[in-house]
Image: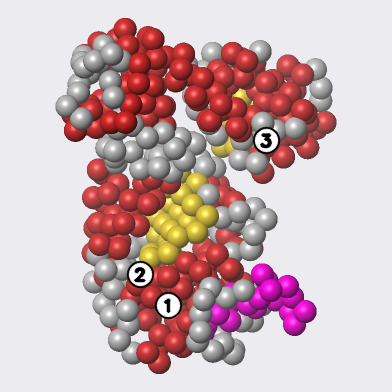
């Protein structure tokens, strides 16, 4: 098979050639866009799921849908060591430009508020990077979104942006990836702002994507967040969608899979979108001709696993310290065969038992792994890998 024509695309956040299995989410979001544009009440949206299930791809697809409706949009990726002010200001600057409000004075006023919000924490002697404004020429607007209390400031900022959008009969969408990495104050402020916007009926929505414990992070910040957002769990693909993710791109290149090959591919990938792309790419490259057979899948399997070991599993394992790696391996041993439980969910007491230590002594390693996004806690006293089948990878390395 010609490798130049290989249609499969394993990559971080890279849109696959066939976005299979997400039709329901895309259709539901179209309804949200129309309702908000017409002044109807709607909740903001939160996508949750493991690494490699396509949250970022879906987030980008939802943003594209908003752009097609004429909305103003902006996207940011949250980071544990970064305040929300600057990246959100940059995202909102782009959204305001996309709105193309006909009144320059109104637009400049909102841009001035965005600039004030971005620069509020920078003192007179701050470095240039901390006094950065996202290319905004409009003068600062004093006394608006610059109190220093991020919750007050964010409510004022998004209220002004929402008013601008309402003037032109459109909406604004703020798309936040890795939302669980926002600081506690920023999460609280964002929830408060979404609450205020929904009460006032302003056409601004937040679409966040994050790991499975994101709902718990939001709930810990504001109790009403459970009613504030519409939560959608993004999981592996059902069999028919997994087959379509393979068959449709191949058909575009005048190739096909045998039924036995599709069976073998699903057994290998378990329907996880990133695995499908990784295996699809390897199988295409080793297959001598179409149709692709189960034998081709068997030959390509080791190469696909090597790519996953380096680019998907290994890159994350390398971020861990020696003590953290011991903890990860103990999790894998405690979980056992995770064929059905892809995340290897285990009790923290079982991990301590494997290592022969008291649970309290392992808290630093566990907390560090939580902050690095390598594990998460879905319920008290239990932890799990954020990457599907990470435990299987660790046991194979042992």
Residue 263 percent location from the top left of the image: 29, 14
Query: Which disc, if any, is residue 319?
Result: 3
Q: Is residue 57 above or below residue 112?
A: above
Classify 10 Å Cα crowding around label 1: few (below 14), some (14-19), many (20 and above).
Answer: many
Q: Residue at x 50, y 46 (%)?
A: 210
Describe the element under mark 1 as helix, strand or loop.
helix
Residue 111 vs residue 334, the one in the foreground: 111
Q: Is residue 106 above or below residue 325?
A: below
Q: Residue at x 75, y 82 (%)?
A: 124
The answer to whether the residue labelled 3 contacts the one labelled 2, judged by CB atoms less than 8 Å apart, is: no
Name the outermost residue toward the top: 295
How far apart in space, not on screen, are marks 1 and 2 (Cα)? 10 Å
Q: Residue at x 52, y 55 (%)?
A: 77
**Residue under label 2:** 72
Q: Quadrant of residue 318?
A: top right
Position of residue 355 in the picture relative to residue 315 (left or right) = right
**Residue under label 1:** 161
Q: Quadrant of residue 376?
A: top right
Q: The N terminus appears in which quarter of the rendering?
A: top left
Residue 246 shows in the view: yes
The answer to whether the residue labelled 1 contacts the one labelled 2, judged by CB atoms less than 8 Å apart, is: no
Which-is-in-front pick, marks 1 and 2? 2
Q: Earlier in the sequence, mark 3 or mark 2?
A: 2
Which-is-in-front pick, marks 1 and 3? 3
Residue 217 percent location from the top left of the image: 57, 50
Q: The C terminus appears in which quarter of the rendering?
A: top right
**In this picture, which residue range is highlighted in magenta?**
112-131
Residue 306 percent location from the top left of the image: 51, 20
């Amino acid at each position: 098979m010609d490798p130049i024509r290989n249609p499969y695309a394993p990559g971080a956040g890279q849109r696959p050639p066939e976005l299979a299995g997400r039709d329901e989410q895309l259709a539901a979001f179209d309804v949200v866009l129309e309702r908000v544009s017409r002044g109807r009440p709607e909740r903001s949206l939160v996508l949750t799921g493991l690494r490699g299930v396509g949250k970022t791809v879906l987030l980008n697809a939802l943003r594209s849908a908003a752009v097609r409706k004429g909305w103003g949009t902006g996207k940011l990726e949250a980071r544990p060591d970064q305040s929300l002010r600057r990246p959100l200001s940059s995202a909102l600057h782009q959204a305001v430009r996309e709105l193309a409000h006909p009144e320059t004075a109104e637009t400049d006023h909102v841009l001035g508020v965005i600039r004030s919000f971005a620069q509020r924490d920078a003192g007179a002697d701050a470095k240039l990077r901390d006094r950065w404004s996202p290319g905004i020429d409009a003068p600062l607007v004093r006394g608006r979104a610059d109190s220093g209390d991020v919750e007050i400031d964010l409510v004022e900022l998004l209220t002004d942006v929402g008013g601008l959008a309402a003037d032109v009969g459109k909406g604004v969408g703020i798309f936040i990836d890795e939302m669980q990495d926002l600081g506690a104050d920023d999460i609280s402020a964002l929830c408060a702002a979404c609450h205020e916007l929904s009460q006032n009926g302003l056409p601004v929505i937040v679409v966040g994507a994050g790991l499975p414990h994101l709902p718990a992070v939001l709930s810990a910040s504001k109790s009403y967040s459970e009613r504030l957002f519409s939560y959608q769990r993004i999981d592996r693909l059902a069999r028919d969608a997994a087959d379509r993710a393979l068959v449709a791109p191949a058909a575009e290149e005048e190739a096909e899979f045998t039924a036995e090959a599709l069976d073998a591919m699903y057994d290998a990938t378990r329907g996880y979108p990133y695995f499908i792309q990784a295996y699809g790419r390897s199988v295409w490259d080793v297959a001598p001709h179409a149709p692709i057979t189960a034998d081709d899948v068997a030959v390509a399997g080791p190469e696909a696993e090597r790519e996953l070991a380096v680019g998907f599993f290994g890159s994350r394992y390398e971020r861990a310290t020696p003590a953290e790696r011991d903890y990860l391996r103990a999790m894998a041993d405690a979980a056992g065969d995770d064929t059905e439980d892809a995340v290897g969910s285990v009790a923290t007491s079982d991990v301590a038992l494997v290592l022969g230590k008291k649970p309290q002594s392992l808290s630093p390693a566990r907390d560090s792994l939580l902050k690095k996004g390598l594990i998460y806690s879905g319920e008290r006293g239990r932890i799990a890998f954020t990457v599907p089948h990470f435990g299987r990878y660790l046991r194979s390395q042992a």
